[in-house]
Image: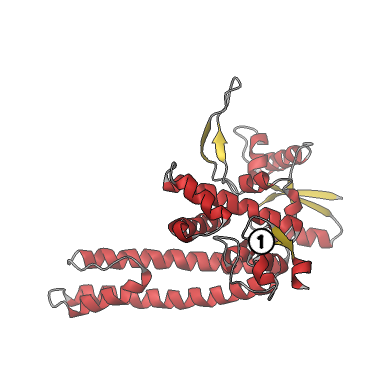
Amino acid sequence: MTAAAVLKPVAHHWARMLAGLGHTVKLIAAEAVKPFVKKGKKNDAADAAAICEAASRPDAKFVPAKTVQQQGILALHAARSLLVKQQTMLANAMRGLATEFGVTVPKGIRKLDELVKLVDEDETIPKQAKQAITGLHDYCKELGEGIETFEAEIVTHARTDETARRLATSAADAFRHIGSLRDPIPGIGPITASLIAATVVDISLFKTARQFAAWLGLVPRQNSTGGKTRLGRITKTGNREIRKLLVLGATSMVCRADGWNSALGAWLRTILERRPVRLVTVALANKMARIAWAVMTRKEVYRAKGGVAVAAQAAA
């Protein structure tokens, strides 16, 4: 018996449960089902009918169920992302409160210690404000310790998972040690590699590198008619966390474009001469996603000059 279900946070759990009972379970994305929900009829029966209709389409695409281990790693990523967000909010609140009394410091989490020191030394700031800023700083440091704990677990996964190691290993490192994280795909570190490995259950579902980039929402939106192609901003569909990390990694590489001595670095500098920085950043993130697809599909490691070396041969 075959069972189809909408892809929601609890869907993978029920997929494993039903598969254990002998059913063939197929998970389908909610956005693929929404067009089949009858207008004005939002109830369980209408949703079930829409799922059956969407699942019966010949072009329907399904998602394999994640394992318990993969969901465990994703839980670490979700917790880390939440703590980072809260830490940023606290840092902004501290800076805002201190600015009201004329105290400012340069950007960066590490500058908060200096901010608290300046606030303590300023006799014009009332003790109530000092107490508030100090309390936020203490809470911010606790969040920082939690983030470091989660990141340590994520890096451990990146060093032990086969797919994550390929994403975080260059061909040069493969000759020395296949688990090295020293020279990965540009802009992809252990955290991004771990998230991609835990999220993408079956890379073969993406037939081309562009499909993988499109799934991440890193391709331009099309508004074409009459044979005229009009491209807009990126779609921003798919997995938000992976896209965010790729864009952040691409941003760091754009900032170091002048010292990036490779074919990809030369391409980046050429594009920067005629395109806005943010557009180039997204274009680089798109290229990073395509490189990641090639590495996972061919089961090879990254070569900085644009080629790849088979991991098994490189490790020999």
The answer to whether 239 is drawn above or below residue 170 in the figure is above
- Quadrant for residue 139, please give it: bottom left
The answer to whether 26 is drawn above or below residue 314 in the figure is above
* Spot occupied by residue 107 in the image (x, y as percentages of width and height): 32, 65
* Spot occupied by residue 95 in the image (x, y as percentages of width and height): 28, 66
Which one is in front, 203 or 57? 203
Which one is in front, 295 or 265? 265
- Report whether residue 281 is seen: no
Which one is in front, 220 or 28? 220
- Element at badge 1? strand
- Quadrant for residue 175, please give it: bottom right
Amino acid on which disc 1 is placed = Tyr
Quadrant where the C terminus is found in the figure: bottom right
Q: Left of 283 or right of it: where is 17?
A: right
- 10 Å crowding of disc 1: few (<14), some (14-19), many (20+): many
- Report whether residue 228 is seen: yes
Residue on which the image places disc 1: 302
Q: Residue at x 82, y 59 (%)?
A: 19
* Residue furthest left as drawn: 124
* Spot occupied by residue 265 in the image (x, y as percentages of width and height): 53, 55
The answer to whether 53 is drawn above or below residue 20 in the figure is above
* Spot occupied by residue 294 in the image (x, y as percentages of width and height): 70, 54
